[in-house]
Image (spheres, coloured by chain):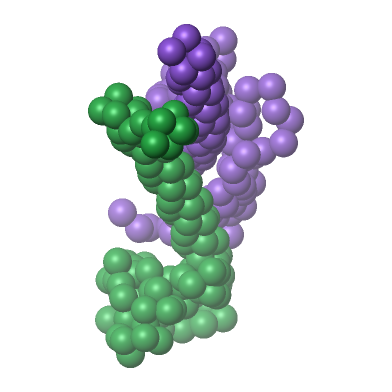
């Protein structure tokens, strides 16, 4: 009986408190890491989306420039009130669809929207901005 | 009696040492996790700051070509623009710069209007490679408001 007492593990209040503190520190550290990792991924996704949109915008602006050049040079004609749509190439999951109205030799933007390809595939509708 | 007291003391010491070891190990693991989380947060802040710097210069250049004024802290050399940003993505002097955004643009005029095209590159201090690039292209049609 004396031997059993000598080798038995004593779990007192202090040990339980220390274990709890250890558990809390480890859990908080793991949560901080998971949260930081998620934030980094979100930030990268956001940066990529901004760059994709800028590439789409560049494509649409170049098409618009070519269109205006053709209209001004007379190689393409349009009637007053005619709606002209420009669609950019797809970058990432994004493309831009811009609609202009032609009046007195000037193209005025009517609609300029960013289309999310995945969303439009999933819902069958255009997710515009 | 003395032997039993010695034995109890030794067991207490072993128990204490084991607890100390477990506590130290857990602290080392937790500290490493916190350090890694801090590093990731710094990387996130840097990436956000670089993106914001590129967007900011993009907006400044677009406004300038649309007839607006160029801020005094933005340097212009022909169609190339350079701006320095601090760690809060605000324009600053070159001596306080954390990020430098450079926009070497080309302006081409055709019958329809003026096309500004180029890529904005953001450089971190002491780095020669761009940390973020953003294309910038804007068309200003003739006769448009």
Looking at the image, residue A81 lies above or below residue B10: below
Residue A51 at x, y percent in the picture: 52, 55
Which quarter of the rendered picture does the N terminus of chain A lie within?
top left
Which quarter of the rendered picture does the C terminus of chain A lie within?
bottom left
Q: Residue furthest bottom?
A: A124
Report the side of A124 relative to B29 (left or right): left
Chain letter for purple, please.
B
The quadrant holding residue A5 is: top left
Residue B55 at x, y percent in the picture: 45, 42
Residue placed most toward the observer, B141 or B77: B77
Looking at the image, residue B97 lies above or below residue A3: above
Say if residue A119 shows up in the picture. Answer: yes
Q: How many marks?
A: 0
Report the side of B139 relative to A31 (left or right): right
Residue at 36% from the left image edge and 86% from the top image edge: A122
Residue at 58% from the left image edge and 59% from the top image edge: B110
Looking at the image, residue A103 lies above or below residue B125: below
Residue placed most toward the observer, A28 or B38: A28
Residue at 47% from the left image edge and 9% from the top image edge: B2
Residue A50 at x, y percent in the picture: 46, 55
Report the side of A32 relative to A17 (left or right): right
Residue placed most toward the observer, A56 or B74: A56
Residue A109 at x, y percent in the picture: 32, 67
Say if residue B59 shows up in the picture. Answer: no
Q: Colour of chain A?
A: green
């Amino acid at each position: 009986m004396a031997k059993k007492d000598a080798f038995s593990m004593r779990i007192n209040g202090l040990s339980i408190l220390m274990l709890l503190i250890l558990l809390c520190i480890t859990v908080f550290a793991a949560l901080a890491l998971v949260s930081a990792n998620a934030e980094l991924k979100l930030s990268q996704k956001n940066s990529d989306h901004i760059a994709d949109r800028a590439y789409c915008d560049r494509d649409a602006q170049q098409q618009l420039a070519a269109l205006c050049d053709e209209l001004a040079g007379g190689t393409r004609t349009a009637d007053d009130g005619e709606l002209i749509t420009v669609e950019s190439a797809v970058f990432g999951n994004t493309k831009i669809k811009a609609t202009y109205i032609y009046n007195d030799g000037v193209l005025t933007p009517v609609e300029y929207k960013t289309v999310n390809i995945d969303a439009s595939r999933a819902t069958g509708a255009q997710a515009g901005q | 009696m003395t032997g039993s007291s010695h034995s109890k003391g030794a067991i207490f010491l072993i128990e204490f040492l084991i607890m100390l070891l477990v506590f130290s190990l857990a602290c080392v693991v937790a500290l490493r996790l916190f350090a890694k989380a801090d590093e990731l947060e710094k990387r996130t802040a840097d990436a956000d700051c670089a993106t914001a710097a590129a967007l900011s210069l993009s907006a400044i250049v677009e406004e300038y070509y649309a007839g607006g004024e160029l801020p005094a802290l933005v340097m212009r050399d022909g169609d190339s623009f350079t701006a320095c940003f601090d760690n809060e993505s605000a324009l600053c002097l070159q001596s306080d710069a954390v990020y430098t955004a450079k926009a070497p643009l080309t302006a081409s005029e055709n019958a329809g209007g003026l096309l500004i095209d180029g890529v904005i590159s953001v450089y971190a201090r002491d780095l020669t490679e761009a940390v973020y690039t953003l294309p910038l292209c804007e068309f200003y049609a003739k006769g448009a408001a």
